[in-house]
Image: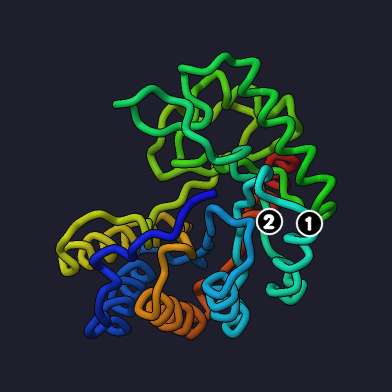
Amino acid sequence: MIARHTPSALWQAPWPGLQSDLERQIENALDAHNTPIRVWFRADDVAAPGTIWTSCCDVFLRHRTPLSPALVPAWMSLARWKTLYKVARGADWGWHQHGWQHRNHEPEGELKNEFGSFRPVQEQQQDIQRGVEKLHKTIGSAFIPVFTPPWNRMSQQAILGLRDQGLSGLSRSCGSAPACPDGLTEFPVHVDLHTRRSPEAEKDRQALLKEFGDALKTGTCGFMLHHQRMNEHALAFLETLLTVLGSDARLHTVHIGELLHEAQEKCSVLA
């Protein structure tokens, strides 16, 4: 299980002028994009309920904003699922798969990867299948058939096997390689809220705002969050962000299941 981490420098103090900074990015994006913009939030490493998870959920519920929790199947149990679902108050959220057990299998010195090129393909496929089966059994119809690989990394062979396990979508960081193949829909995240590593808070503020603004101009902006890395300042940021997003009818907050349904409907029309 992933341990609790110290929040990044960005969240060691309040963000001065946050609301105006966010509103400026949104206005610039809306000036450049004349159709409604979709915003969605992916919460990684979810399985064990706790105080921080409850606080995070409360923010989204208070603002009636859907969340897309990425569940680590090996960490899940029926009891944990019941608690997670209770904390979410039965919300219609985008519960989907986050690898199998969030375990790195790469040699020392390589970037962490649960489904990287150093593992036999058969082992990877078995783990993906185990995860799918576990989530179907544990959370039933709430399961959205989308796969988020731990650390946002995955080999091409592993990606090609996702469809064989009944998965329809893949979510990684924007610009990830290898490319998503035909038959799978990709749902990238553009803004990393909690695993930023700069020791300079102001530098990270400017980088985050640029990521946010650039993504909005494309028509869809995905946020990646890690509740284990959050503190009171990170929660305050979410409060302000969701307040600002909810104040403009041209911004639509959705979850990954809604994005998948929309993509599938488009494919049906084109077919």
Mark 2 and mark 1 lie on one chain; the one further toward the N terminus is 2
Res 51 quadrant in image: bottom right
Q: Is residue 249 above or below residue 121?
A: below
Q: Is residue 168 above or below residue 199?
A: above
How far separated are the C-alphas under marks 2 and 1? 6 Å
The answer to whether one can see residue 221 in this image is no
- Measured from the top left, where is residue 206 in percent x and y? 20, 65
Q: Residue placed at 44% from the left, 66% from the top?
A: 34
- Measured from the top left, where is residue 109 in percent x and y? 29, 26
Q: Tag 2: residue type? A: Trp
Rendered image: mark on residue 223: none
Work out whether residue 205 or residue 103 is closer to the camera in this orientation and state it.
103
Q: Which residue is mark 2?
A: 95
The answer to whether one can see residue 13 in this image is yes
Q: Is residue 87 above or below residue 132?
A: below
Provide the secondary structure element on which disc 2 rests.
Answer: loop
Work out whether residue 108 or residue 264 is closer to the camera in this orientation and state it.
108
- Measured from the top left, where is residue 115 in percent x and y? 53, 28
Q: Residue placed at 40% from the left, 53% from the top?
A: 190
Q: Which residue is mark 1?
A: 142
Q: Tag 1: residue type? A: Ala
- Measured from the top left, where is residue 162 in percent x and y? 66, 29
**Drawn side of residue 143 relative to residue 102, left or right:** right
